[in-house]
Every structure is written in C-alpha cells, then in structure tokens.
Amino acid sequence: MANQYERSTKKPKSAAFKIVTTIVIILLLLFLIALAFFVYKFFALGNSIHNPLDRDKSELRKKAVDVNGDPISIALFGVDSDSTRAAQGGGERSDSIVLLSINPDKKKTVMVSIPRDTRAEIVGQDSVEKINHAYAYGGPKMAINSLEKLMNVPVDHYASINMDGVEELVDQAGGVTVTSNATFTVKGNSYVKGQKYKLDGKEALAFIRSRKEDGAGGDFGRQERQQLVIQALANELVSVGSLPKINQIFDTLGDNVQTDLKISQINSLRSKYSDALDNVDRNQLEGQDTILDDGLYYFVPSDSSKKEVVDNYRSNLELD
C-alpha cells in the first residue's frame, strides 16, 4: 500500500513539473522573440534614419569627438514640410534650430535656441539671409556650416525631425507635461504662466509654434516652449511607460527623423549622457528685430548676448 501511495503521489508532481517547465520555456521563447524583434527594429531604425555628413569632423575641432564620453555638440533641426513649398520645388526650412552641448562628466547640458530669422552668412550659398534658409538650400550640411560660422562653435552631429512627426511622437508617448512659460491662448486652449499642463500631440505642436498670440512672447517665448517640449518629449520617449508602444515609436522616428549618428552612437548617448540631460541650462540670444536695406525682416543678435551665450556653450564643451 505504501508503494502504491508513493507512486500515486509522484505522478501529479511530475505532471505539475512538466506544466511549469513548459510555461517557462514558452515565456522564454516569447521573450527571445520580443528581444529579436526589438533588436531588428532598433537596427532597422538606425538604417532608415542614418544620413551621414560628408566629413570626418567639424572644421572647428582639432580631432573628432568620441561619442563614448567626450563633451559633444549637437544641432537639432525641426523642419517644416510645407506641401505647397515642396510642390514649388522649395526645400525644407528649419522651423526651429537648437544647439546642445552635452558634458557627461559635468552632468550638464547647455541648450541654445537660434531664432529662425537670425541674419547670418549662408556658407556655400555666398549670401547673407535668414539662417533657416540654409537648410532649404543645402540640407543639414549647409545648415551646420552656417551655424558654425554664425556662432563660432563646433557642431559634431545633428538630428532633424519633421515637425509633423513631433505631434505623432507626443501622442505615442502618452503626451508631455510642461510648465507654461507665458499666459496666452492658442487654438482654443489657454495657458497660464507657471502652471503645469498635460499636452497631446496637437496641443504640443500648437504650444511650440505659438508666437503671435497676445502674451505668447513672440519668438523668444516660442523658442523657450520648443526647449520645454523637446526636453519633456525626450524624457517620455526613454521612460519605461513608452515600451508598449516602442514599435509605433520606431516607425514614426523612421519616417520623420534624419541624423548622421550611427545606431551604436545613439545607444551610447542614451547610456552615457543621460544624466547630463537631466540638468539643462537653457539659453536664448538677445538682440533686435529689424527690417534691413533689402526690405526683409531679420533678427540681429547683440554682440554682448552672443558672446555670453557662446562662452557658456564652449565652456561646457571644455574648449579654450
């Protein structure tokens, strides 16, 4: 009887063990499939967004930076894909221009907004025009060369995003939370300075484009809102909460982003520079809005403001 009892108790234990083992194997396989899909999407994204520049380094650098811990300078372009302009054969203009100097050792990022109407030499075009024309004439390379000429700072890498893609990314990230820098109303939504708001994609795009509405603060207010939304969106996209939508996020990035950074460099930025992105020193050029002899409206930065901003930017890059 004892032997029969022992045999009868061993069978259900063995069956339970097999069931648990089967579940573990299934879960492991699902994890491996998900991991393989993520890796595939990650590298596919790298291929679709990679648009290298025809250069080894900035001409303002003695040697190329190592995206593995060196202080780095990156230009961010928000490009406006205007269908009417495209139909007329015009290029994309940079609706927003932001420079980032990121120092992982100091754990500090210096962010500088360049007004799109800033009067600047367009390098390679032999003209003096609004800085946002450079991207339309010669894409990111001409825009970067013109920025370096204007600001006397190296630009090591760049990333461009279609502004329509910002709306999609904000929605996929579940919205962004920002503290309004001004009291104004745009597209039926009202904001009060100092109060926090959760914005969906459509609201975020209107928020960062607003400049003519009463209280919006013109170009300066607009530039600051661009910085606020960029930082909030970056934080949301790298958060755990975005993982369930990673496939849609990758697809949107692939359709709307271009960069000369390789996928390994992007991963290095995420892992080694993330602490610096939590400490952002936001800067704006001060100057004068004016109509010059050609009859066009320009923003002309003051020498003192430009020097202060450039010195701060270069200091974070540890340049002499």
Image (spheres, grey):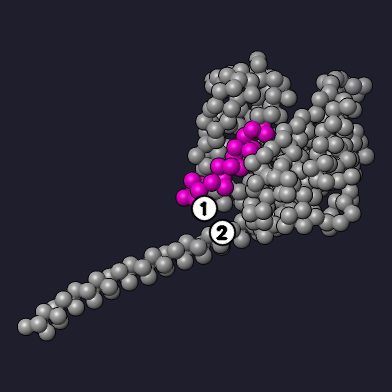
Disc number placed over residue 247 in the picture, else none: 1
Q: Are marks 1 and 2 in contact (CB under 8 Å)?
A: yes
Q: Secondary structure under badge 2?
A: helix
Disc number placed over residue 41 in the picture, else none: 2
Where residue 187 sits, quadrant-wise, is: top right
Amino acid type at image mark 1: Asn
Identity of the residue drawn at 64% across and 52% down: 270
Q: Secondary structure under badge 1?
A: helix
Label 1 vs 2, first from the N-terminus: 2
Residue 202 appears anywhere in the view: no
Q: Is residue 97 above or below residue 14?
A: above
Q: Is residue 267 above or below residue 166?
A: below
Q: What is the count of numbered marks?
A: 2
Identity of the residue drawn at 85% across and 51% down: 58
Q: Is residue 265 above or below residue 16?
A: above
Q: Does the magenta portion include 227?
A: yes
From which residue to which does the magenta span run? 226-245
